Image (spheres, rainbow, N blue to C red):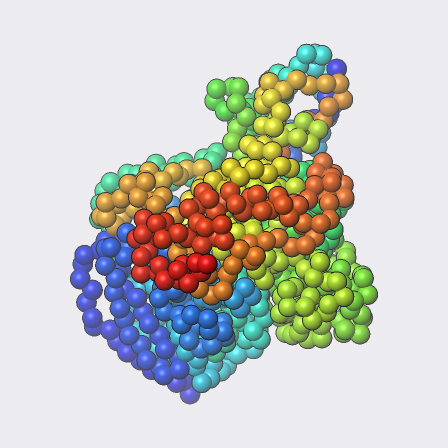
Amino acid sequence: MKIQVQYFGQVRALVHKRGEEVDVSSTATVLQLLQHLVHAYGVALEAEVLEDDGTTVRDGLLVTVNGRAIGQLEGVHTGLHSHDVLALLPLFAGGG
Amino acid sequence: MIWIKKKSFTEKVKRSLYGYKGKILYVDLSSGRLKTGSFDEDFAKAYIGGTGFGIKTLIDNQAPGIDPFDPANPLIYAVGAVSGTMVPCAASKFGVFAKSPESHLLGESYSTGRFGAELKHAGYDIVVIKGKAPKPVYLWIDDESVQMMDASHLWGKTTWETEEIIRNDLGDQLIRVSAIGQGGENLVKTACLINDHFRAAGRTGMGAIAGSKNLKAVAVRGTQDVVVAKPEELQDLCRDLYEQAKGPATSKYRGLGTAANVLTLNAQAALPTRNYQSATFEGAETVSGEYLNEHFVTKIAGCTSCPCRCEHIAEVPEGVFKGAIARVEYEPTMAFGPYCGVDRLDAVIKAIEYCNLYGVDAIGTGIIVGFGMECYEKGLITKEDTGGVELEFGNGEAMVEMVKKIALREDIGDLLAEGVKVASEKIGQGSAHFAMHIKGVEVTGYELRGLKTCALGYAVSRRGADHQRHGSYGWDLGGKVDRYSVDKERGKLVMGDEDTYCIFDSIILCKFTRRLWDFDLIAKIYTLVTGIPMTGEEMRLAGERMSNLARLYNIREGLTRKDDTLPPRIMKDPIPRGVAKGSYVHPEELDTLLDGYYEARGWTKEGVPTKAKIEELGLGEYAEIAEKEEP
């Protein structure tokens, strides 16, 4: 099935595109899609997306499916459906 | 001719405190008198520095209920506990405190750069400035020599001109200057203090307080060491922290910078747009951090002792605003971009530059311009009022011109300079519905209608609408809670955030490094610097103490539960489009959130600290404030 992936922030800078359509199996989860992307784009992307355990989304990165944070779904085990939109967004905090 | 009141201090402060200088400088601008005081270890441990010192000094030195522009309202500078040391991302910070002319409650604002470390090296942890000079002056702190200098030739100058003239007059290019521009002189309610060109103690109108005192600037040069308790152990720990601070935990701040939040918040329908009429902006791409870096950023710089280097200095290369230069972060980008419907970064950069030069808060002033734009489009103010400016959403030139008019109080700018609360009261005709402020302080860059934990944080924030006293948007945006619903448990989350941020702002740590720190580590480094034993739990308790003392101060100045509220638009108008479409904070939801927060805090249903809580936190001397509120 086809999933629309949107890139923002440092991830966009790494993959050099705003988004793309990715083909995954009909039973794919968010984690499997992220691992698919890491496989396609290499360790630099892995460092931005996943913690060292390879299964946890890195702190400071927001992953949404159809606009909803995966934390409010089933986390990285959220099942994907055809034509879902998955976004990788940097989450900045005010500072100074 | 320079008017000088000079006093050299020979008083020796006993070496009982490490890290701190242990000295408070008191300045009376009315009489020209100067004196110093000291504080002991108990004071230091209870209030840490920065925030804690500021709130404690304010409540103890300001007569209850006075007008913010009363000369007796003290303007207080307080540096962090570890300012001036090698602790990374913490050496340079300072806070400024006074009763706010916007909220008539606690005013506080923080800045960084190099001024804070210089003040500590000059020998002071706290400077308390009272009174009103008979003519413009600036305070010149040259180690132990403190002078009030004539500033007549600086009045009417921008902050950058002021800094340059003071350095040249005094013949030292390493002098650090915290100055007001025309905004502060004109008592613009969002006036701020600018140091190191691009750094602002921006919020709650501290620049207006300086202006009301005829105080143009504080200039400081310090050459004294800050003696720490355990230098070798501190050095070892700081070496590790430097490496971490250069690593992944802060790379996004160094790389893209906070302006990258524009697209994130736009995607999440959490980007305040066109004076909160929308939570998404169709022009977000061209005011994004990504676009900024590609087309405008010319330099990345950092503060004293900071390995993160987050300052994205942007310059306009061509066009009508060619040559404009500013440090660009998310908040001012939001305020002068989406909030005003402007999709041009050249105009955003120019507006921020004007804010720095005239010395007005870029967040609050942008929100005011957005409010003016909605008034203009609704016909509540006219082209005649604006002095010919077509103040429509999306008009970048008009936006820039209006910033100048606000700072100089020209045309409608004179009214807008009072802030959106007062301006809406004067304009009337329903404009209060879209006057986006809390406690008189303009909103910041998180769309609260679809971020309900964050909405609570804003509603109870001690300095009015603000994301920096709690950072509670993290729960909502990070998906750790349901951002569209409420429950009483959110109160615990906001309370924890507030107390943590109190400590961050007391040490004072840059919040960009928040992922490096917890209470135990902060306590450890505090002890290495000061020699004062401190546990993580004691540190947390100090944060809670500060939150409660701030609440007591605000209650003393007239705050009640009804002030812990949100603008009408947030409680009535649903978000019109985007993933958060339909969301708003119903008044009953706000009540649920407030009840949960007060319970978590151990306060009464009216939001007053209980006697038991006051005693638990060692604030018994202020119990009378709460007792007056008891039914």
Quarter that holds the N terminus of chain A: top right
Q: Answer with the quarter of the image where residue B621 lies.
A: bottom left
Picture mark count: 0
Left or right for B615, reference B373: left
Q: Is residue B38 visible?
A: yes
In the foreground, B22 or A22:
B22
In the foreground, B437 or B624:
B624
Left or right for B514, reference B161: left
Residue A37 percent across, percent down from the top left: 63, 21
Residue B257 percent across, percent down from the top left: 56, 44
Left or right for B163, reference A34: left
Q: Is residue B469 visible?
A: no
Which residue sits furthest bottom? B1
In the foreground, B606 or B25:
B606
Which residue sits furthest front? B631
Residue B428 percent across, percent down from the top left: 73, 67
Left or right for B501, reference B11: right
> At 63% from the left edge and 74% from the top edge, which residue is drawn?
B408
> At 38% from the left edge and 45% from the top edge, which residue is drawn?
B88
In the foreground, B153 or B50:
B50
> At 38% from the left edge and 38% from the top edge, which residue is drawn?
B518
Residue B558 percent across, percent down from the top left: 49, 64
> At 66% from the left edge and 45% from the top edge, which residue is drawn?
B586
Q: Is residue B171 above or below residue B561?
A: below
Q: Is residue B466 above or below residue B289?
A: below
